Amino acid sequence: MRVIRTETEIEAPPAAVWAVLTDFADYPTWNPYIVDAEGTLAVGEILTLRMVSDGKAQTFTPEVLAVHENAELRWLGALRWSWLFSAEHRFALSPVGDGTRLVQSEVFRGALVPLLRAMIDRTERDLRALNAALKERVESS
C-alpha cells in the first residue's frame, strides 16, 4: 500500500469550493489533470474520468464511494482484479476561518503498487497541480 496526500487552503467557503469541484461540465476550462469528467455523483455510480499526465491521456471508470456535500467526495478505481491494483481517491473539504482546507489523497493497493512508483509520483505532482488550479478558479470567481 502507498498513500499520497496533498493539501491547500482556499480563500472561499467549502460550499464555493464544492460547487466548482462537482461541476464536471466545467472541468475542461480549468482542470489540468482531470480534463473531462462525466457521471452522477451518487454512491454506487460509475464515473468516466479522462486524465492527462505528462501529455498522455487515460480514461478511468471509478465507482463513487462517498458524496458528502461541501465535505467529501471519494471514489475507487481498480483493475478487473483489484488485488492487482486499486486506487481510492478522496477530496476532503473542511472550514478554516472564512476559507477551506482542501486535502486530496489517494490510497494505492495491490501487488502492482511497488512496480508503479514513477506513476504514483507523477500522480502526486498532478494532484498538486489540480489543487492549485482549483484554488485559482474558486478564488477568481
Image (spheres, rainbow, N blue to C red):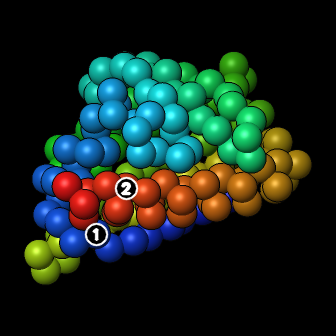
Q: In the rendered image, which residue does mark 2 sit on?
A: 134
Label 2 Cα crowd, 10 Å radius (few <14 / some 14-19 / many 20+): many
Q: What residue type is labelled 2?
A: Leu
Tell which of 55 and 108 is nearer to you: 55
Occupied quadrant, residue 1 = bottom right
- Name the quarter where the C terminus is drawn: bottom left
Task: Determine whether 113 is above or below 50 in the image.
Answer: below
Q: Which of marks 2 and 1 is nearer the N terminus?
A: 1
Is any part of residue 43 visible from this angle?
Answer: no
> Residue 23: x, y in percent?
28, 35
> Residue 80: x, y in percent?
69, 19
> Residue 96: x, y in percent?
19, 77
Q: What residue type is labelled 1?
A: Ile
Side (left or right) of 43 relative to 131: left
In three-dimensional space, the C-alpha distance between marks 2 and 1, rounded to whole angstroms, equals: 9 Å
Q: In the rendered image, which residue does mark 1 sit on?
A: 10
Side (left or right) of 99 relative to 110: left
> Residue 39: x, y in percent?
37, 20
Q: SS for tag 2?
A: helix
Side (left or right) of 46 relative to 140: right
Label 1 Cα crowd, 10 Å radius (few <14 / some 14-19 / many 20+): many
- Give the residue drawn at x 11%, y 75%: 98
Q: Which residue lies furthest to the right in this view?
A: 115
- Give the residue drawn at x 29%, y 49%: 72
Task: Determine whether 6 is above or below 60 in the image.
Answer: below
- Give the residue drawn at x 51%, y 35%: 35
Is any part of residue 13 visible from this angle?
Answer: yes
* Label 2 close to label 1 by CB (< 8 Å): yes
- Give the residue drawn at x 48%, y 29%: 36
